[in-house]
Image: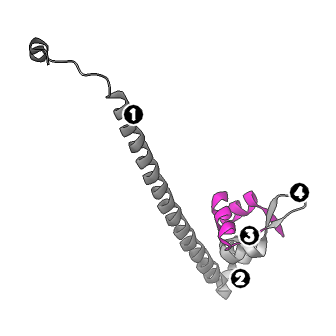
Amino acid sequence: MKLGISEAARRAGVGRQTLYRKIESGALSKEIGAEGKPVIDLSELSRLYPQVVAAATMRQPASDTADIQKTGRSDNLLQAELAAARHRIQELEADRTDLRAERDKLLSVVQEQATSMRLLTDQSPRKRGWLSRLIGR
């Protein structure tokens, strides 16, 4: 099953930019769909984001709940969710690190611009004090 980038991001619980970064780094492969837009195969998405599979298997009828508890399959689902949550945390921490680096770059640019602006505006002639005017210097 092929998913658009937005749908794949929604199912994986990540942002579209995260998926684009994964595609650019080669961690996730994409194809070009019939409309010329990028699509991701569901199996490829579930390779990186196990919660996609866990979410699909969790949509079971309520009557199966007892069977799940008897067979211990709920442990497997919880393990898959835990792994997915840990993976999501790692991605969020990486995004936070990237954002901090971008913020630091922007702050340095703003500081450079402020320094330049101060230099440009401080070049007006200074008023001489009354003693300098009296002496003529």
Helix, strand or loop for disc 3: loop
Crowding around mark 2 (Cα neighbors within 10 Å: few <14, some 14 to 19, many 20+) is few
Residue drawn 61% across the image and 82% down it = 75
Pointer 4 or 1: first along the chain: 4
Kind of residue sitting beneath label 4: Glu
Task: Using the image, tell me which numbered label, if any, was put on residue 117.
Answer: 1
Helix, strand or loop for disc 1: helix
Helix, strand or loop for disc 2: helix
Residue drawn 86% across the image and 58% down it = 36
Task: Using the image, tell me which numbered label, if any, was put on residue 106.
Answer: none
**Residue lying farthest to the top in this orientation:** 134
As measured in the structure, the alpha-carbon distance from the residue carrying label 4 to the one carrying label 1 is: 49 Å
Q: Nearer the viewer, mark 2 or mark 4?
A: 4
Residue 39 or residue 108, whichever sits in front: 108
As measured in the structure, the alpha-carbon distance from the residue carrying label 3 to the one carrying label 1 is: 60 Å
Would you say the residues marked 4 and 1 are in contact, meaning their CB atoms lie under 8 Å apart?
A: no
Kind of residue sitting beneath label 3: Arg
Pointer 3 or 2: first along the chain: 3
Residue 76 or residue 92, whichever sits in front: 92
* Residue beneath disc 2: 67
As measured in the structure, the alpha-carbon distance from the residue carrying label 3 to the one carrying label 2 is: 14 Å
* Residue beneath disc 3: 59
Crowding around mark 1 (Cα neighbors within 10 Å: few <14, some 14 to 19, many 20+) is few
Residue drawn 56% across the image and 71% down it = 85
* Residue beneath disc 4: 35
Pointer 2 or 4: first along the chain: 4
Instruction: Give the quadrant of residue 118.
Output: top left
Instruction: Give the quadrant of residue 133.
Output: top left
As measured in the structure, the alpha-carbon distance from the residue carrying label 2 to the one carrying label 4 is: 43 Å
**Residue lying farthest to the right in this orientation:** 34
